[in-house]
Image: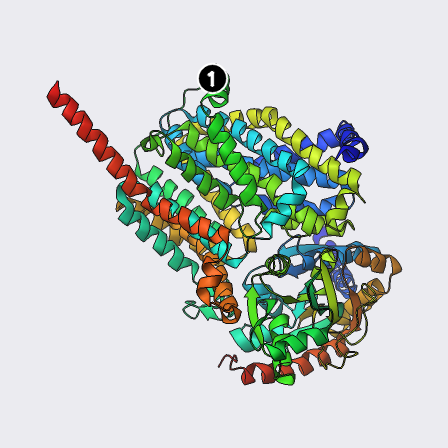
Amino acid sequence: MGVAVNEFILPSFLNLLDPLNIFLMIAGLAGGIVVGALPGLTATMGVALMVPVTFSMDPTNGLVMLGAIYVGAIYGGANSAILVCTPGTPSSVATTFDGWPLCQSGRADEGLYTSLLSSSFGGIIGSFFLLFLAAPLAEGALNFGASENFWLCLFGLSTIAVMSADNMGKGLVSGAVGMLVSTVGLDPNSGIPRFTFGIYEMVQGVAVIPCMIGLFSFSQVLFLIGSQRQHIAEYHPRKGTFGMIFRYLATKCKVVLMRSSIMGTLIGILPGAGGEIASIICYNESKRWDKDPARYGKGCIEGVASSESANNAVIGGSMIPMLTLGIPGSAVAAVLMGALLAHGLQPGFKIFTATGELTYTFIASQFAVNLLMIPVGFLLCKCMARLLNLELSIVAIAIVVLAYIGAYAISNSMVDLWMVVLFGVIGFLGAMVGWDAGAMALGVILGPMIEENLGSCLQLAQAADGGLMTVMAGGYINKGLIFALILSLLTPFLLKWKNARKNKTCDKGATNA
Amino acid sequence: MRMFKLLPLLVASMLLTLSVNTTFAADYPSKQINMIMAFSAGGSSDVQARIMEKYWNKYSNQRWTFIYKTGAGGALGFAEIARAKPDGYTIGGLNMPHIVLQKLGQNAQFDPKTSFAYICQVVNDPQCIAVKKGSPFKSVKDIMDYAKANPGKLTVGMSGKLSGHGLMFLDFKKKYPEAKFADVYYKGAAEQNVALLGGEVMMIFGNLNDVMRATDQMDVLAMASETRNPFLPNVPTLKELGYDIVSDIRRCFAAPAGIGKKELTYLRDTFRKICNDPDYLADMKKAGQPAEYMDGPDFEAYVKSQYGKAEKALSDAGMLKK
């Protein structure tokens, strides 16, 4: 390590002072934040669109810029999640849980600054792991096979139980409907089309992003138009909010931020799981371990902080197996790997020595980007918050137009536009009877992963000596995950029991007095 | 009065512009060409097409506009190419054996035998048999011996059942029924590589392009190609080892069927020039793309021959879509 410090790390930080690199980082961040904030334009798409542009650049400059776009886009998704209850990228679904209530209660600026500072913090923790612990963590990630991923996804899905603790039945039904929706299309294990109702375009299944745009943003627009409001929400920015949030995060949220960032990094390393799962699991854990879990979902700073620090920590994590093993840890990392290969760079442990200067410059740029994000993001989120001052009718139209463009841009398919409308209506009507859009989105996102991994497990079981049980429950990781899953499912009952006991003692106290 | 004098002039000038237009149209291509990609931006197919684009601009005065029409393992994009107007201004990338398997197994909305005018093949990415470094299997013979001695215990990782890997597995099963493997399917090359390196499966059928990225952790025991590949010249072919298995993924470019002869000739000529450009070949090598050129008519014959073989293999396995 000492050799690497002298040989690569110091020069690579100096490389960043190159004005071109600084310009590319700022431009990449700003572009990424805008792409991330627009519903439908995801981090994956933003990075992919810029890959060909880097072909005419020096590989170092190109990678620095792509990395900045990635960071910007994952953070940017929080802005629309907070301001219009529309996750700009699938990674910020969990940000809507507390970000939107914050916005509705006129505290949008608190939510925006929380997401900015937590994203930056999470990103730095992720980069730290990438710089110092890449090799051992990559080896560890290889122990995550089909069964481990299956349990992890189920654990993610069990969030529904905690998320809708007051009405678990409706949460579970929503999640189940989401999973049912995710079975439309090609069977991931045999490749045979299912539930396409004779419409050939349906073989691609229900794409996650159009479905989410429908559930969250289109239904939100329907709801807003139906209300008699003039604006999306009251917005009274106060002076000193930024400093107040900074102090709050630095004192009261230390544990939440640290736990979410570390868990986010670790989940990012897993090839099967990315920011969408990390943010939900970390949100869930913050809620579970909080002294007063009932605050969550009602506009709680910790909720936004855990989801946003987790999804930005995923970035550093997802690059660990990509750089060391040639196995991307997320969809965006896969695109970045394509860019590496197109520049003639072969991933592998050699990448830290043979092309060490480039690799370390890239990693160093991740630190710089996460710091630069604070001023860049601060300016942009101030602009975006103005949205709340616009008249509702204009904002509503703008959201629908952007949602449509975003949904269409994903695969140039008209079917996706109909999906937006369909799920918009489902989300709108569902909300009236108490369906949970978050739980349904979880089902749609996690359904295919659960099915793929279960399929692989069943196939592996043919060859295993003890059959399915050895495959599914063998090994410490599987046992640990199953235990965590059971605990997670029991949480609502434990909470109820705890509350009941507390009330009892209170009542007792009251009568005694 | 003056108007009458002007009228013939006007008509004449209009005719002139019209004729200019027609001569202009004769100079194909006179506008940008749409390039339909059935896989997402930044993926392996896209990287290859982007390298190609660089050299297309060297030989042609018109550029490409990339259109990404993704989903269903490429089937939706392929169908879009088949449905496009055959005026020479929409072409796209196709993958073999995907187009054949999607038609046979999923009722895809195109027919590889009649829907496309093939321009040329650009990549031939053979399947490799790879094991983790330090595995007890040192050769294909070790694998076959183990599979015979322990039927159904040797796990093989592949990506997708209706895929080149799945087809190779069916071929193996049919030709060497005495060796029984346990087939395990993953979503893609990344998941498959993790499964091998993490010890979940004992070997994989992986494409050269994917296993090459991990040669410091994997041993490639054999390649299912006709001849040895310059990327890994020390790896023997299965044929050399006495196993008659050839299996690969190929990428080609195609226009919708019904395209004019002149346009098709222009496209085929330009692509041939690109494929013989030494700088292009150097770029392809750098990106780890196993380039192999085959001209349009030969490729069409290849598709037809593979169609017959795949139909037989799938119907034997009961996987044919009625």
From what the image shows, is residue B32 above or below residue A235? below
B248 relative position to B57: left or right: left
Q: Position of residue B230 (x, y in %)?
A: 83, 66
Instruction: For the N terminus of chain A, give its image quadrant.
Output: top right
Q: Chain of mark 1?
A: A
Q: Position of residue A194 (x, y in %)?
A: 44, 68
Residue under label 1, please give it. Answer: A244
Instruction: For the C terminus of chain A, give its image quadrant.
Output: top left
From what the image shows, is residue A283 above or below residue A52? above
Residue at 49 percent across and 63 percent down: it is A457
Which picture quadrant has residue B215? bottom right
The amino acid beneath tag 1 is: Met
Nearest to the observer: residue B291 or residue B171 = B171
Label 1: element kind: helix
Q: Residue furthest right?
A: B278
Q: Position of residue A396 (x, y in %)?
A: 41, 38
